[in-house]
């Protein structure tokens, strides 16, 4: 099992450009999450999904959109990137509320110039 | 709402020293409690967990006990190694919930 994978690993964008980050998990997990990690701020939840076809806003959703068309994939989109979105992005998943350990991907380091 | 507070870092120790990283929480009911570790350049990974009061989670020489009376889940290790240098996150998930609340993280440096 690959666990949780993220593509790309690194990306540099110019202000106003768009991109999509892909997260994939092969553990048949129901719940998936997108976080951003900034120095001194820990992890902040951007969006999450409790199942295929469902998404919901987290703590810092502005400027991001998500989709979960397939259970194993959770996409994070930036429509018009801003320098404030420079961060490391992590995807995570859990099997359910009983088996609730989070499995994290390796992260995507995004720089917006 | 639920919250997690952990000691600020960085924490710098010499090899073989004793480690304590304090973590306290606020939550209703009986949340599950976790410690995650993040090594440089990697994602977080579960270090240990406890799901009910007085449970002790342990892994790789690290331990933490779920103390309901003091709402604490302090991380301890008797003898740290250079390879333990990482950022440690205390976290909780509320009863029946599906969102994990993370502390701000504590960076640990271990010197040889």
Image (cartoon, coloured by chain):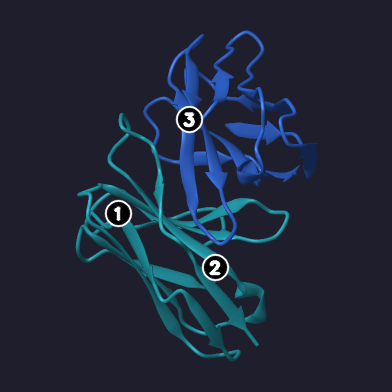
- For mark 3, give the secondary structure: strand
Residue in view at x 31 percent, y 29 percent: A98
| Above-or-below relation of B20 to A91 | above
* In this picture, residue B97 sits left or right of residue A69: right
Outermost residue toward the front in this view? B112
* In this picture, residue A22 sits left or right of residue B46: left
Residue at numbered disc 2: A62
Residue in view at x 47 percent, y 86 percent: A18
Percent coordinates x, y for residue A11 in the rendering: 51, 82
Between B16 and A10, the residue placed more toward the observer is B16
Mark 1 Cα shell of 10 Å, populated few (<14), some (14-19), many (≥20) = some
Percent coordinates x, y for residue B81 in the rendering: 65, 38
Please check whether the numbered discs 1 and 3 fall on a single chain: no
- For mark 1, give the secondary structure: loop
Chain letter tied to cyan: A
Could you say which disc has been placed on residue A3 in the image? 1
Q: Chain of mark 1?
A: A
Residue in view at x 56 percent, y 66 percent: A88
Q: CA distance from mark 3 to mark 2?
A: 33 Å
Q: Chain of mark 2?
A: A
User: Quarter-wise, where is residue A87 in the image?
Assistant: bottom right
Chain letter tied to blue: B
| Above-or-below relation of B53 to A50 | above
Do residues under tags 1 and 2 come within 8 Å of each other at their CB atoms?
Answer: no
Residue at numbered disc 3: B48
Q: Chain of mark 3?
A: B
Percent coordinates x, y for residue B95 in the rendering: 41, 25
- For mark 2, give the secondary structure: loop
């Amino acid at each position: 099992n690959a666990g949780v994978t993220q593509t790309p690993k690194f990306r540099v964008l110019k202000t106003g450009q768009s991109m999509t980050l892909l997260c994939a998990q092969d553990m048949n997990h129901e719940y998936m999450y997108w976080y951003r990690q900034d120095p001194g701020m820990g992890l902040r939840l951007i969006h999450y999904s409790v199942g295929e076809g469902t998404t919901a806003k987290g703590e810092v959703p502005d400027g991001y959109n998500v989709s979960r068309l397939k259970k194993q994939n959770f996409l994070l989109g930036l429509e018009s990137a801003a320098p404030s979105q420079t961060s490391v992005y992590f995807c995570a998943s859990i099997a359910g509320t009983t088996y609730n350990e989070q499995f994290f991907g390796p992260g995507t380091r995004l720089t917006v110039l | 709402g639920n919250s997690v507070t952990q000691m600020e870092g960085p924490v710098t120790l010499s090899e073989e020293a004793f480690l304590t990283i304090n973590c306290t929480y606020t939550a209703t009911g009986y949340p599950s409690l976790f410690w995650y570790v993040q090594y440089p350049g990697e994602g977080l990974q579960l270090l240990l967990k406890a799901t009910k009061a007085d449970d002790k989670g342990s892994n790789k020489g690290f331990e933490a006990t779920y103390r309901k009376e003091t709402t604490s889940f302090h991380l301890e290790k008797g003898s740290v190694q250079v390879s333990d240098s990482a950022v440690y996150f205390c976290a909780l998930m509320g009863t029946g919930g599906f969102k994990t609340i993370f502390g701000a993280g504590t960076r640990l440096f271990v010197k040889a």
